[in-house]
Amino acid sequence: MINTRLAYLEPKSVSKISTVMTFIICIIGLIIFLIAMGIVVAAVPQLKEYLFTNYITYTAIGIIIGLILTLLLTYVSSYINALLYNYLMKYFKGIQFELTPYNEIKEIDIIPSLSIFMILTSIWFIVSGILLFLASSVVLSLLSQLTSRFANLDLSTITVGSLTVVTLIVLLSIVFMGILALITMFIFNFYTRRNPLKIEVLENNGLELKSINVISYVMSIGLTLLTIELIRTVMNIMVGGSMEVALLTIINTIAICIIYTASVPAIYNFVASKIGGLKFDIEPSSNMIQEYPITENLPNYNIPN
């Protein structure tokens, strides 16, 4: 039964955890990229001189700037997301789920969870759409002033057209994300009813997510992601493609999903052990029948990592 409501997220802990995890994932991705490039260069020696002569400096600068911007955007966006979530809790139910006495998440309440997700998603898409529209308007205005080729452009018509296009993109994106989130939640509930997501929660000026069980994460969220990716892969195969490529794609999808979903909780557990975990508060949900005390686990109950 749905018995728990995520009532509060501490913005600082959310942004800190998100930024550090993003940094680690980016570094791992960079190492994999460099290894792959090393293999390619070793196989084709002619590329070594060409790459080092023409692209190495720009690539290094681009990687550094990209990493800094990614970390900055991650910190700011996750902090704002937590603030928005906490504010919206005054008016909406928020994320609700079934939490057992053993700190196992067995099911999420789809309607309120989807509602809060759609509100947050809509806010970000609308803000992005406004920024995109303003940027395109500024660029067109500058072009019309600086270049005679664009002097005869009807800026009012182009502005209306740009606004229409941006609005359609935002609306379609919101609808698509809503459908995808709905399907994802149904699939997640299907797996968590059979393999609950196990977490370790401590009391530390509120509640702190100390660790996530890797196996249960893979068996719930990992299988959810894998199912969605396999559906997408099968749809791509139906459109066209050879059977050999299809089988290779499916194998790659399975491997990537398992490795990715196993690495995320492992990285989180490492980061949480060093700088502290995600801090939050919960309360009984509005439709709770029986209250489960989150921190009153059985004696000597340990979640294997």
Image: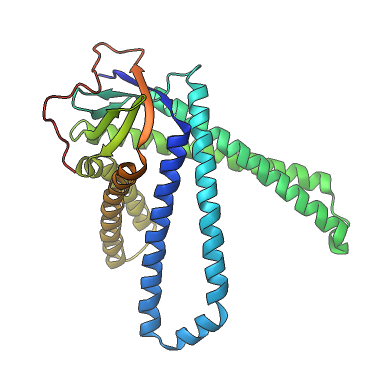
Choose between 131 and 236: the one closer to the eye. 131
Quadrant housing the C terminus: top left
Q: Position of residue 71 (x, y in %)?
A: 50, 50
Pick the front one: 55 or 110:
55
Q: Residue furthest left?
A: 300
Tell me which residue sits at (37%, 72%) in the image: 36
Does 253 sit left or right of 48 as displayed?
left
Judge from the rendering whether residue 249 lies leftward or rightward of residue 153; answer left or right.
Answer: left
Quadrant of res 17 = top left
| Residue 304 left/right relative to 247 | left
Say how many tags the image has.
0
The quarter of the image holding the N terminus is top left
Image quadrant assignment for residue 287: top left
Q: Would you place residue 198 above or below residue 101 in this image? A: below
Give how far across and how far down residue 127 sits, in percent: 62, 38
Q: Residue 114 location in percent, x, y?
A: 42, 28
